[in-house]
Image (cartoon, rainbow, N blue to C red):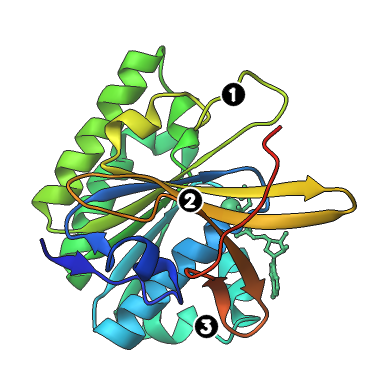
Amino acid sequence: MKRVKTGIAGLDDILGGGIPQNQLLLITGTSGTGKTIMCSQFLWNGVKKFGEAGVYLSFEEPADAIRENMKEFGWDFGEMEKAGRLAFIKYDPFRIDEVFNILDSTIREIGATRVVVDSISALGLHVRDKSELRRMIYNLSILLRKLNCTSLIVSEIVHGTEPKLSRYGVEEFVADSVIVLYYERIESVFNRAIQVWKLRGSEHSERLHPYLIDGSKGIVVSSGEEAYVRRR
Ligand SMILES: Nc1ncnc2c1ncn2[C@@H]1O[C@H](COP(=O)(O)OP(=O)(O)OP(=O)(O)O)[C@@H](O)[C@H]1O
Ligand SMILES: [Mg+2]
């Protein structure tokens, strides 16, 4: 099986070498766990370390905010965009039907093989029921696979509701693979932990590993260590 390396320290190790090529990987977790940073780092490394162009479809944060925030880590996306190696897709809520066509043409235009959809939950606002959402994500996965892309889609774990891996509880079934990010309190300290929940067709770490968001390196996973968090 061919692997696409995230280039994120420790993450490729717990994935058994990287994301299986052409897969759709769901990143889920509560707010502020670093999902957007992880996705950005995947695209940044794609261009810088592996020569792969990327497309970022952001339904939540405006591209400008992502560009600004990621500069803190030394990742200048503007420069990559000018070079035609990276593209942000601006989401227009009135043209939801067209968003996948735009994604399709943007991927072809720059020859992207890495794609981020952050977050997939936005689609849920435009569909009648869960089965329609499931079909929509499934169609998206077919499109991305056809275009030979390895993709990250983001969903959220919402606290205070029934325990679910994702916002709508369907995302994890459509995705080939799932990574869960936790931010949990033990006494007065909050701990970050990451887990590979499933990885289709591959072995992976079955442990919970600590990770941190480093001001200069971005996400750093301690693949050799075990995390202790108390699930709520
Ligand atoms: N420059 C930085 N240095 C260190 N940590 C940072 C930096 N910028 C952000 N963070 C950490 O990352 C968190 C936000 O990460 P990110 O935006 O990726 O989360 P998210 O999971 O996408 O959240 P949401 O679900 O709200 O979209 C912040 O709460 C902060 O703890
Ligand atoms: Mg985010």
Number of numbered tags placed on the structure image: 3
- Frontmost of labels 1 and 3 is 1
Occupied quadrant, residue 17: bottom left
* Residue on which disc 1 sits: 163
For label 1, the SS is loop
Specify few, some or many for label 1: CA neighbours under 10 Å numbering under 14, 14-19, or 20 or more. few
Q: Earlier in the sequence, mark 2 or mark 1?
A: 1
The residue lying at 45 percent from left, 72 percent from top is 10
- Frontmost of labels 2 and 1 is 2
What's under tag 3, amino acid-wise?
Trp
Q: Return the residue nearer the eye: 73 or 187.
A: 187
Specify few, some or many for label 3: CA neighbours under 10 Å numbering under 14, 14-19, or 20 or more. many
Q: CA distance from mark 1 to mark 3?
A: 35 Å
Q: Given the current orientation, which residue lies at the most extreme right position?
A: 188
Where is residue 55 shown, x and y percent of the image? 33, 63
* Residue on which disc 2 sits: 195
Q: Is residue 140 left or right of residue 153?
A: left
In the image, the residue with mark 3 has its CB under 8 Å from the nearest atom of ligand 1: no
Residue 61 visible in the displayed image: no
Specify few, some or many for label 2: CA neighbours under 10 Å numbering under 14, 14-19, or 20 or more. many
Q: Quadrant of the N terminus?
A: bottom left
Where is residue 232 shown, x and y percent of the image? 71, 32
Occupied quadrant, residue 217: bottom right
What's under tag 2, amino acid-wise?
Gln
The residue lying at 19 percent from left, 66 percent from top is 3
